[in-house]
Structure formats: C-alpha cells, structure tokens
Image: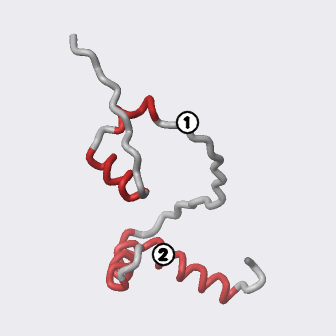
Amino acid sequence: MAESKLKSIPDFVSLDELVEFFDTHDLGEYWEQMPEAHFEVDIKKRRHLFALDEELADKLTEIALSRQVPSVVLINSWLREKVLGNYPDIQ
C-alpha cells in the first residue's frame, strides 16, 4: 500500500496565482492545510417568482436579447418604471 504524501501549498504573490494554481490542481490534496474560515452572511435581497404567459415570456426574452441584457434586468427595470411612475408614494 502506497503512503500518501501531504503536498505543501506554495506561496502565492497574488490572488490570480492562487486561482490559477487551483484551476489546475485538486483542492482535496491540500484540504488539511487550508485555514478554517469564519464569516457572516447577511442576505438582504429576496427573489419572488411570478408566472407569465408563455407568449409574453417569449417576447420579453426576445427584447432582452436584442438589448443584450438579461431578461430579469429588463423586467425589473420596466416594472420599476411603471410602479414608480404610477405610484410615486410607494417606495
């Protein structure tokens, strides 16, 4: 049975070097050497799903593609304009 040798993580001068290294190396071989990370996550945005008629969804997708923006960006922009234009007191 072959003995597994612990590979040492090289020192990196930049974040780009680190990313390039792990793009070509298995992180699992270095897992034990990785420092434990502690951080808090504060999620403030929520997503809401709404059903659209298929024909309308297709048209929105077509318009978004022609403007080279994601459909969700186009839809949010148009809804924001409509809501704020008609209901300026609602934020």
Percent across and percent down for residue 27 are 36, 38
Q: Amino acid at mark 2?
A: Val
| Lateral position of residue 45 relative to residue 67, left or right | right
Q: Which quadrant of the figure has residue 53?
A: bottom left
Percent across and percent down for residue 72 are 47, 71
Residue at the disc numbered 1: 36
Residue at the disc numbered 2: 73
User: Helix, strand, or loop for circle 1?
Assistant: loop
Q: Which quadrant of the figure has residue 6?
A: top left
The vertical placement of 62 against 29, above or below, is: below
Quadrant where the image shows the C terminus: bottom right
Percent across and percent down for residue 5 are 30, 23
Which residue reaches farthest right? 89
Front-most of residues 17 and 91? 17
Q: CA distance from mark 2 to mark 1?
A: 36 Å
In the picture, the disc for residue 55 is none
Q: Earlier in the sequence, mark 2 or mark 1?
A: 1
Residue visible at 40% across and 51% down in the picture: 12
